[in-house]
Amino acid sequence: MTPPTSSPSTLLAFAAQRKTIFAFLLIAATLAIYFPALHNGFVNYDDARYITENSHIRSGLNWQSARWAMTAFYESNWHPLTWISHAADVSLFHLNPSGHHAVNISLHALNTLLLFFVLQSATRREWESFFVAALFALHPVNVESVAWASERKNVLSMFFLLLALYAYGQYSARPSIFRYSAVAIFYALGLASKPQIITLPFLLLLWDFWPLQRWNPPTAPGANAEKDSIASLWRLCAEKVPLLVLSMASAVVTMQAQTRGGALQVANAARRTPAAYPIALRLENALVAYVRYIEMLFCPVGLAPMYPHPGAALRAVSVIFSIFLLSVITAITLLACRHRYLPVGWFWFLGSLVPMIGIVQVGAQAIADRYAYLPFIGLYCIVVWGISDLTNQNVAFRKSVAAFAVLALIVFGALTYRQIGFWRNSETLWNRTLQVTKNNFVAHDSLADYQLKQGRFAAGCLHFQAAVSIFPDDMPAQEGLAVCAQARSDNGEAIDRYGNVLRRALEPTIRATAFANLGSIYRGLGDYRRARENYDSALQIDPDLPIALVGSGLLAQKGWDYSLAAAQYAHAMRVEPTSVGYLLLAKALQLGGHSAEAAEALEQARRLSSNLQNDLKTADGLLAQ
């Protein structure tokens, strides 16, 4: 009597049911772990310039904001789809951070699901694809990309990259111009979200080797076999040329954006900055950074939004060890290339990190959690497929390893849940960063900025002083110390410090703020000519700077030019609405004979104010200067 066998239709139904279960588990786990991020606020690490204080984004999604998004090199970046997505968030959720975080979490969940389907479609291995996607979903290194509202560009670009990868799988199965066009379109959309995916043509060549196996090196000696293999490889390379053109175009635009924004190479006029290290130091740090990322894969603790560049303090022994380890791993993956996932996963990790590894230094960081979002997929594949192959012949051992893998995912999920809590607000984030990093002047700057905005000037000034003691050419800290001097009415010291900042800083935002604050000092001293000159200089750099607009309006009102005063106040209120600003606008409109508009402005002030009498006194004090 023969045992019953399952029909092909039954097997297909079971496979589809299993895929559905895997997909549900991935989505449920991702949403459950990241749910606390919905209670997080914005942080003072790009969120203000990207969202809360960006007048183009604050206006919501409209023709003007979309046009700005397509043409702006704002914040040293060109990523129009990212700007459009932020503007759409404002239209939907206004400035409620929960909505913005919800979109990031949803994109990460979609990316997790896409990664599973891309891998499963290409490899026909469901369990391995599931565990790779689960690692991607739950690994703590990805918290920065998801829980940080401004890092929308990371999850959005990954979404389009994975769509391009899936479309490429469909194209490789049945080549056609239509399917190739889908790959190119998704890739272009990804580049318009964040250019970090610029290495996709290279990654697709790896994908051709494994899992698609479109290129097969000769397994036996023979001139014809080698000739056919080389010809096949050249065809695959030529196939990527249109995508490579997109990569080159993106690289040119990105370099222009970063150069114009002052993010590339040098960050101050004195050329003394972490971004201005010689190429030798940058290469050494890149080697050490690769090893630090590998360590982060297996031991994701002590994560932070900013890891300071070590510069010349980098130890030779660290560089030598990194060269040795990277060389050994590379040799092993090449020698064991019959397991194709080994070289593919390893070179995926190495290659996709190249744009962010610091050879072309942008900013003052040595490494960044967000940079691992794409590259770690290669390492996940090595780990999962490697363990699967090792346990394939031993069923009992395989069950033990599966239990351990589930335990590892639980641990990673718990660490992720904990890490999300550190992004709750600026103070929590930067206090944590100072605990887990050393000599982090950026963390001191950011914490000081938060404390000053909370009115805690003494604590904030101490952190600015700490930042300067670590890195004397830290321009945000130097400007912060000028603000501290201004707050304690030491105008002489404040003027000297702002002058020093303007002589040395290249960053547009720092220069604009310095000019505007100098204008306020001179206005308070009654030197209206110098005040006007400084306000005008600030507005030439940043036409939307509220402090300069309000200051310029105060000068116009003092000169009885109520029309200009009202225009400047109104402009400032479109950028950053405040009760005091609307009171000033109401006064200028009233004096200019526009009673109805003045009443509307006064009503806006009442809506925004928590203490209208105090705000009236503040407005009167400003007008009296």
Image: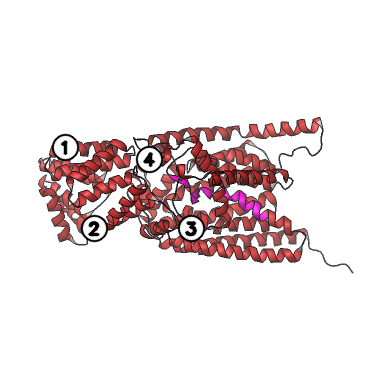
Q: Residue at x 28, y 48 (%)?
A: 480
Which amino acid lies under the numbered mark 2 shown in the image of this protein? Leu
Name which of mark 1 and mark 2 comes first in the sequence.
Answer: 1
Q: Position of residue 38 (x, y in %)?
A: 43, 61
Choose between 17 and 290: the one closer to the eye: 290
Residue marked by disc 4: 74
Q: Which residues are magenta?
A: 359-384
Residue marked by disc 1: 530
Which amino acid lies under the numbered mark 3 shown in the image of this protein? Gly
Q: Marks 3 and 4: CB-CB under 8 Å? A: no
Relative to 529, 316 lies left or right:
right
Q: Nearer the viewer, mark 3 or mark 1?
A: 3
Q: What distance separates the C-alpha of mark 1 from that of mark 4?
A: 29 Å
In terms of secondary structure, where does tag 2 sit?
helix
Q: What distance separates the C-alpha of mark 3 from that of mark 2?
A: 40 Å
Query: Is residue 185 something one can see in this rendering?
Result: no
